[in-house]
Amino acid sequence: MTINRILVLAKNVFQEVLRDRILYIIGFYALILATAFRVLPEFAATAEDKMFLDFGMAAMNAIGLIITIFIGTGLINKEIEKRTILVLIAKPVSRSEIIVGKYLGLSAVLAVLVTTMTVIYLLFLQFGNIPHPTASILIAAIFLFLQLSLITAVAITFGVFTASLLATVLTFAVYLIGNITQDLVQLGRLSHNPGMERLTQALFLFLPDLSRLDLKNDAVYGLQALPDNITLIMNAGYALVYSTMLLAIAILIFSQREF
């Protein structure tokens, strides 16, 4: 793979997503935060600060997830369905470079999106004089980006061999199950059923453990609730390794496809 060609592909994806006006979603995020800022005190006079902290992080996560899944599953699949993949393959660019370039391009969009939403979120907290652990929120935002990048790799992997709709459903299913894999293991043990235990263990081993990258609650409750630095580094490394593994699988599948 050549880094220059990968960067050109990533830049093209980044510009294409911007042309689709996807970053208008940032304005939508600011709008729903403003609405929540005005409405929540009417429903929770004594806990509106805590609720706003929760709502802001949850909304950021939901918006990022929707964009990741719907755009990520179409990065390769859209090229295949429109037959524009033939133009890319005809150029002096390898299939592995296409996969990595697409992944990095969308990851760059997600980085801009998460960064901007985090700044907006912090501005609302500052404007409303809502006590908040800034360092914890920033760390949670970084891990949200890592989680979305991992989901991007999942979406691309499904997108190289399934239709867009099926890839979207499968990616969303991986996200849902990935957030409860540890609970599934505990459920399997409590069931005292060997078959159920093997199934939950298999899900835990093969599906990403996304709960390791979800620090929303830790951010809301303060820096002292965050995992220690070693754990944070290990969890970040886990996300990077898992994403790399998924991209390798996507490249392997994509390299075998005939067009």
Image: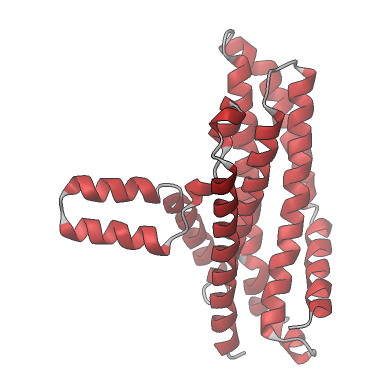
Above or below, 159 against 231 in this view is below
Towards the viewer: 97 or 158: 97
What percent of the width, then of the height, locates residue 14?
Answer: 80, 62
Relative to 243, 185 lies left or right: left
Residue at horizontal 27 percent and vertical 60 percent from the top = 199
Location of residue 131 by image quarter? top right
Expressed as whole percent of the image width and height from the top left, the position of residue 210 reads 50, 51
- The total of numbered circles placed on residues is 0
Quadrant position of the C terminus in the picture: bottom right
Q: Residue 167 in the image: x percent, y percent?
A: 52, 65
Residue 111, x across and y down, in percent: 74, 52
Res. 209 in view: yes
Q: Look at 54% across and 39% down and name the residue there.
A: 227
Q: Answer whether residue 257 is visible to the viewer in this image.
A: no
Q: Residue at x 58, y 58 (%)?
A: 237
Q: How is the image coloured?
A: secondary structure
Vertical order, 21 against 256 (above or below): above
Residue at the spot 61% in from the left edge and 42% down from the top edge: 61
Q: Quadrant of the N terminus?
A: bottom right
Residues 144 and 71: in front is 144
- Which residue extends farthest top? 45
User: Is residue 65 shown above or below 99?
Assistant: above
> In this image, 194 relative to 205: left or right?
left
